[in-house]
Image: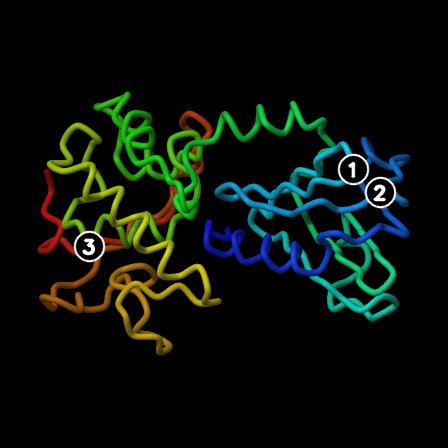
Amino acid sequence: MPEGDAVWRTARRLDDALRGKTLVRTDFRTPQLATSDLAGETVQSVSSRGKHLFARIGDLSLHTRLGMDGSWRTYDAGGRWTRPGHEARVVLQTERVQAVGFLLPTVELLTLEQAEAVRARLGPDLLDPDFDAAEASRRVSADPARNLGEALLDQTNLAGVGNIFRNEILYVRGLHPDTTVGDDPDLTRTLATARRMLVANRAFPAIVTTGVDRRGQRTWVYGRGGEPCRRCGTRVERRAPIVTQTRGVEERVTYWCPHCQPAP
């Protein structure tokens, strides 16, 4: 699933292509919006909050999420798509550009008030220049007994962390994946680490947490089960995901170094 940095880049790309442009054709390929037509409306802006995208079009907001397999791609008007047509969920066309959303799990047309309500339910965006660290800390620390990694993934606490960053944040902080929020000795530092990682990665297509942008060397533990820890040489452990959901957060595959991240 794309993390907050990837969604941030998608929003900037769409904003560059569509902002201030009038739509000459729209095609919503979802049952609930099949009859909707925004042709003639102007795209005011496209922005992100964590893993959510909001395109303000006239007096409405198009709310979408990428989910596991979704993407937004832009083409010249009349250009050939690089994904199959049956995967398209939204087409926004201006005189010169087509923006196509493929396999989007969420496609909603909201009033501006409804869109603001969705934003309000989400936690502070780690890539927002005005990131509210105090509010993020308040939300995360509201349940001290909760698993810390799960709390970081919960987009209503803070917006933008996905599973790669979750694993890497815990490793850099030396925290075992079973650590609870209340057992984190310095939650402020953990949130600062999360923000620093996303900010450092927002302009690049590949997530790099080690500082080395070369294949096989980009992450500390994520995707490295069975390999030696880059710091101490201990075998990196891997825990398979649990196919259940707790409070709307699906547990995902976990990687950690038993020596650098001792059990609590």
Quarter of the picture containing the C terminus is top left
Q: Nearer the viewer, residue 102 or 205?
A: 205
Q: Amino acid at mark 2?
A: Glu
* Local secondary structure at mark 1: loop
* Local secondary structure at mark 2: loop
Q: Amino acid at mark 1?
A: Gly
Is the residue under label 1 in contact with that under label 2 (CB below 8 Å)? yes
Is the residue under label 3 in contact with that under label 1 (CB below 8 Å)? no
Residue at mark 1:
58
**How far across and down, in percent of the image, does residue 116 sit?**
59, 27
Residue at mark 3:
172
Residue at mark 2:
41
Asked if 222 appears above or below 123 in the picture, the reply is below
Q: Nearer the viewer, mark 3 or mark 2?
A: 2
Q: Earlier in the sequence, mark 2 or mark 1?
A: 2
In space, the residues marked 1 and 3 are separated at their CA atoms by 44 Å
